[in-house]
Image (cartoon, helix red, strand yellow):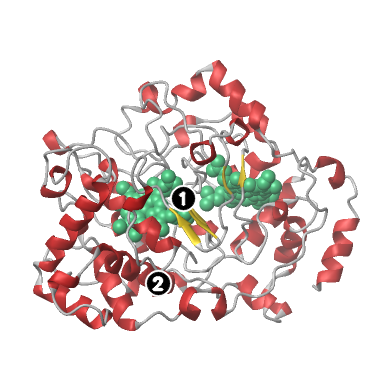
Amino acid sequence: MSRLSVYRACLRWPLVLLLVGTGAALASELPSPVVATDYYDDGRPSVAKQRLGNFLFFDKVLSGNKNISCATCHHPQHFGGDGLSLPIGEGGEGLGTLRTTGSGDNAILERVGRNAPPLFNLGAKEFVHLNWQGRHQNKGTRLSLPCATKDFNACPDGLDNVLAGQNLFPMVNTPEMLGHPFENDVSTSTLRGVARFPVMWETYVTRLGEVDEYVELFRSAYPDIQSAADMKIHHVVNALAAFQTVAFRSDQSAFDRYLRGNPGALTAVQKRGMELFYGKANCASCHSGKFQTDHAFYAIAMPQAGPGAFVNGRSEKAEDIGRYEVTGKIEDRYKFRTPSLRNVALTAPYGHDGAFATLEGIVRHHLNPVESFANWDATQMVLPSRSDLDELDVFIMNDPASAERIVAANQLAAVELADTEVQDLLAFLDTLTDPTVATRLNRVIPIRVPSGLPVED
Ligand code: HEC
Ligand code: HEC
C-alpha cells in the first residue's frame, strides 16, 4: 500500500479527529526504511570492541557480589529482557521466569522497580532518551547523566554515546548489580556521598585489570591502552555499547521488507492492521518513526505495581512518578517513554512495570485506558516468589488517592475498535518481529568468559 492510500484510508474516519486528545495529526505517515547510517558507526563498530563488549555483557565480574551479569536481565533467551514483570536483581538465582528471589542471607531485599526493556536498536542515534523515564539523555552535543548527587562532574570523559552513558549505572545500582554496603569490594570501596560512583567504577576496572585475558582484549580494542594501568571505565561501557549496537540491531522484519519495497511481505490481514495502526487506531501518533516510538513521554493510566526506579520513600507509599523524576514538573507525573515496538510480540510482559502479561491485554488497555485501569487483574504480574505482592507492589492500586491521580493524568484518548480490528492490529504488530533475531542473539551467548565465572545460558 502506498503512503497515499494509507492516508486515504485514514480520511475515511474523520471521527478520529475528535478522539485525539493531544492535537496530533490524523493520519501518520509510514516511516522510511531503516538504513545503516541510522546507527552509530554506521552499525559497524570495531570487531575488537564488540568482542570485548560481548564478554563483559555476560560476565558476572561486573557485579559487586559476582553473581549477576547484564545478560541475567537482558538475556537472548528472552529477547533482551528477562520474561518477568519486575526483575530480580543480585541475590536472586536462576534465569528468566524460573528465577527465584534467592535464599538465606543472599535473598533480595527488594525487587527492581521497573520492567527490564529489551535492548533492540538502541545503537540507533535517534534513541536519545534511555530508561523508561528518560533519565539518561543526549541533549544535542551534551550528554546529561545523573552521575552523582550534586556532582555532575563525576561523569567520566570519553563516552561514545548515550547508550554507553546508560551502561555506567546498572553496575552501581544496589538492587540490580552492586549489592549492599560492606558485602563486597565495590560496594565497600566508598562511603555514601558525593562522587562515589567513580570510586566504584575504578574498583571494577581494577578487577578487570587483574585478568590477563581482559587486558589483552582491552589492548586490541583500544589503541590508547598499553597495560592495565591505562584501562578506564569509559573503555568498559563503550565496548558494551558497541556490542549492543550490533547484537540487538533488528531491522529485518516483514514490515521492514514491506517498507523496502516488497508489497507481498505483508498479508491482507496485516495490511488492514497497518492501516489501523497508522490511521483510525491512532497508534502512530506516539509510536511513530522508524522504530515505532516518538521518544516522548506520556501518561497512559498504566496500572502501577512497581515501586519505581528511585527511592521516592521506597516504603509502602512508594509510587513510580516516571518522567517527573527528571523534570520535576507536576505535569510530567506518571509519564513514561513511548516504547519501541520492534519484536514486541516476543517481549512480554508489557508496560513500564510489566503490568500486562499479553500483547492483546496491553493493546486493549490502550483502547480504553481508564476502564482498563479500574478493572486491571494484578494476578497476571509475572513475579516469582510473589509473597510481597499484596504488601508492597499493588499498594498504589489499592490507594484511592494515588489511583485517582494516575487516572487524572491520563493523556491517551479512548478508541473504539471491533474485535476483528483488534485482531488485525495484533497481526500487524506481529510483522514487527525480526525472524533472524532469535538465531542471531543465541549466537552471542559465550561458552565461557575471561573471569572464569559461570555463564548463564
Ligand atoms: C537486575 C536486572 C538488570 C541488570 C542486571 C541490568 N539491567 Fe539494564 N535495565 C534493567 C531495568 C529494570 C531497566 C529500566 C530501568 C528504568 O527505566 O528505570 C534497564 C534499562 C537498561 C537500558 C535502557 C533501555 C532503554 O530502552 O532505554 C540499557 C541500555 C540497559 N539496561 C543495559 C544494561 C547493561 C549494559 C547492563 C550490564 C552492565 C544491564 N543493563 C544490567 C534491568 C537490568
Ligand atoms: C499517547 C501516546 C500513545 C498512543 C496513542 C499509543 N501508545 Fe502505546 N504506549 C505509549 C506509552 C507511553 C507506553 C508505555 C507506558 C507505560 O509503560 O507506562 C506504551 C506502551 C505500549 C505497548 C507496550 C510495549 C512494551 O514493550 O511494553 C504496546 C504493545 C503499545 N503501546 C501498543 C500501542 C498500540 C497498538 C496503539 C494503538 C492502539 C498505541 N500503543 C497507542 C504511548 C502511546
Instruction: Indicate the quadrant containing the C terminus: top left, top right, bottom left or bottom right.
Output: bottom left
User: Mark on residue 217?
Assistant: none
Instruction: Indicate the quadrant containing the N terminus: top left, top right, bottom left or bottom right.
Output: bottom right
Query: To which residue does mark 1 refer?
Result: 131
Q: Residue at x 30, y 43 (%)?
A: 88
64 vs 260: above or below: above
Q: Secondary structure at mark 1?
A: loop
Q: Residue at x 44, y 66 (%)?
A: 161
133 left or right, relative to 62: right
The image shows residue 233 at horizontal and vertical percentages of 26, 62
Q: Secondary structure at mark 2?
A: helix
The image shows residue 130 at horizontal and vertical percentages of 48, 54
Q: Is mark 1 within 8 Å of ligand 1?
A: yes
Quadrant housing residue 58: bottom left
Residue closer to the observer: 13 or 451: 451
Query: To which residue does mark 2 refer?
Result: 247
Structural crowding at the residue carrying mark 2, measured as other residues with C-alpha within 10 Å and reported as few (<14), some (14–19) or many (≥20):
many
